Amino acid sequence: MPHEPEPAARGELRAAPPFLSWAGFYCVVAGALLAEIVLFIAITLAYR
Amino acid sequence: MSALDWLVLFGTLGVIVAYGVWKTRGQQDMASYLRGGYQDRWYTIGLSVMATQASAVTFLSTPGQAYQDGMGFLQFYLGLPLAMIVLSAVFVPRYFQLRVYTAYEFLEGRFDRKTRQLAAFLFLLQRGLSAGITIYAPAIILSTVLGWPLRLTCLCMGGVVILYTVAGGTRAVSQTQKHQMVVMLGGMVVAFVVIVRRLPTSVSLGNAFHIAGALGKLNIIDFSLDPSRRYTLWSGLLGGFFLAMAYFGTDQSQVQRYLAARSITESRLGLLFNGLLKVPMQFLVLLVGVMVFVFYQFNLPPVFFNQPELARVYQTPHAAHAAALERDHVAAFTHKRAAIERLDDALNRHDATSIAVAERSVRESEASFASIRGEMKQVVAAAVPHANTKDADYVFLSFVMRNLPRGIVGLLLAVIFCAAMSAVASELSALASTTVVDFYRRGLCKNASDAHYVRAARWFTAAWGILALLFAIFASLLDNLIQAVNILGSLFYGTVLGIFTVAFFLRRVQGTAVFVAALLSEALVIVLFLRTNVGFLWYNVIGCAAVVLISAAASAFLPKARGPATLGKVEGM
């Protein structure tokens, strides 16, 4: 087909994110979720 | 509504749509029309993904749900951030590696054409029907509360969306969604601040939380292991994780959003941005509902929030009973308000004994107050045939129209319209992409020019839009069908996620095994739905697990294909 997009280059697939590694970003998201759950449990227990 | 509200409403919507159309003018090839030309940054992807999920019902019904049942619904979203991590690490690189237009294209390279088209067909069936509901559900509430004609409301909302989605394709959708999401988030923050400021001056935010908590509205986390309970910590984390994996990883209306990124890094960051922001956003929306509840502890609420339905009761022989209940409602409110004021006073004095006594009194008066509301719902049901007695959907809009200042009303209506338009636009764009790429170009018209497929995509977008609009306009005639459509979505996601899970993680399993497993698993989920009362979030786990287990077992018995299964090339392009 004309103008069919090319598959992504290997380099692009392995590109690092800014500031942190991917593992670092995943830890930030998982850590934020954990903090939110702790906060929600605290609210549930404090205001029941 | 005041002139200022109309100005804010139409000004906000008009500017966003005009900017989206202007920004995406002159697109000619498929890569720009169906994948947005690979130009979007991570924040556009993140906001666009959030806007696609946030339909108008999110802003109309969710505060009402918190008003009525508390904040337990928040647990539904707890699996979402974890799903964003897995999608970012596993799904996105694979989709980008193959530069697919739709998620289902990937399945043909991995399995075969029939598995690809089964998944694409399930998507078209489910999303095609629900697009009409996405227009109809908010239109019925808006038209009831604002007194606008229902069909005109559907036409205005749907018509504008069809126009800009046909004109600008997926990039117009992303560009408009970015601004629509900013309006939605900003609008809810403004609503929260205004509601808190409208509470009596003696009521601090801490006291407001205490009052809400005493009446069971801050019960966010439920540790119950009972599978029939819809929202618990476990169903939210596990069932919500599987649902989010299925929705964000395999539903084309979402996949198309992050495939529009300018690079894989931007796409992955956009999904993680959604993972960070989604739970706090839902917390805010539910908290607005709880604050509306606290507001109505000091100000008389309607006995029944769907006021036009209540007005119909007064045209029937049940009018005297309804009037008596309204008088009881006012008396019960006066009694309850006195108890709430004693609690507020005790809280301000930090007197633990008085607080405990006042809490008991508040709970007792709330129980008698709620029983009058329950009785009024029974009167409405008896007086008006086919009446909708679930008035929680009307709580927030009714509150906005009665209690918020000029300008803010227009802004919050713009929030609701933005949410409806953004969700519908994503659906139409994804339906058109899947129809063109997975069926039209794959089987019906294989070797046409790029311009031909862009034209076809525009026509399919318009056709799906008109179909959705017709469904919305005539939906009131099809009550049972609407209920069926709402249930339909939750029945298919587990199976489709199972197909993709096998594709990514079980490399030995081939096309026929997974195809057979998908059909059997779907049958299993439907039997569970018809014969048991298992909460719907668990269908995603069960459907996915069944596809994985059955396809792994079946692949041991079915003859092997000649070549090894690969994660590679997409065929028939």
Image (cartoon, coloured by chain):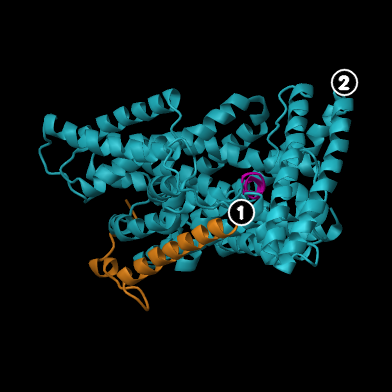
Chain colours: A orange, B cyan
Q: Nearer the viewer, residue B259 or B217?
A: B217
Q: Earlier in the sequence, mark 2 or mark 1?
A: 1
Residue at 79 percent across and 60 percent down: it is B7
Horizontal side of B533 relative to B108 (left or right) equals right
Circle 1 residue: B286
- Residue B317: give its label: 2
Horizontal side of B64 relative to B339 (left or right) equals left
Q: Main secondary structure of the magenta part?
A: helix
Task: List the single residue furthest toward the front.
Answer: B353
Visible residue check, residue B500 = yes
Residue at 37 percent across and 35 percent down: it is B444
Give the residues in magenta. Answer: B60-69
Residue B518 is drawn in which quadrant?
Answer: top left
Against B421, residue B269 (above or below) is below
Q: Amino acid at mark 1?
A: Leu
Task: List the single residue furthest toward the bottom.
Answer: A19
Q: Name the subunit of mark 1.
A: B
How far from the left and from the top, in percent, is residue B526?
40, 27
Element marked by disc 2: loop
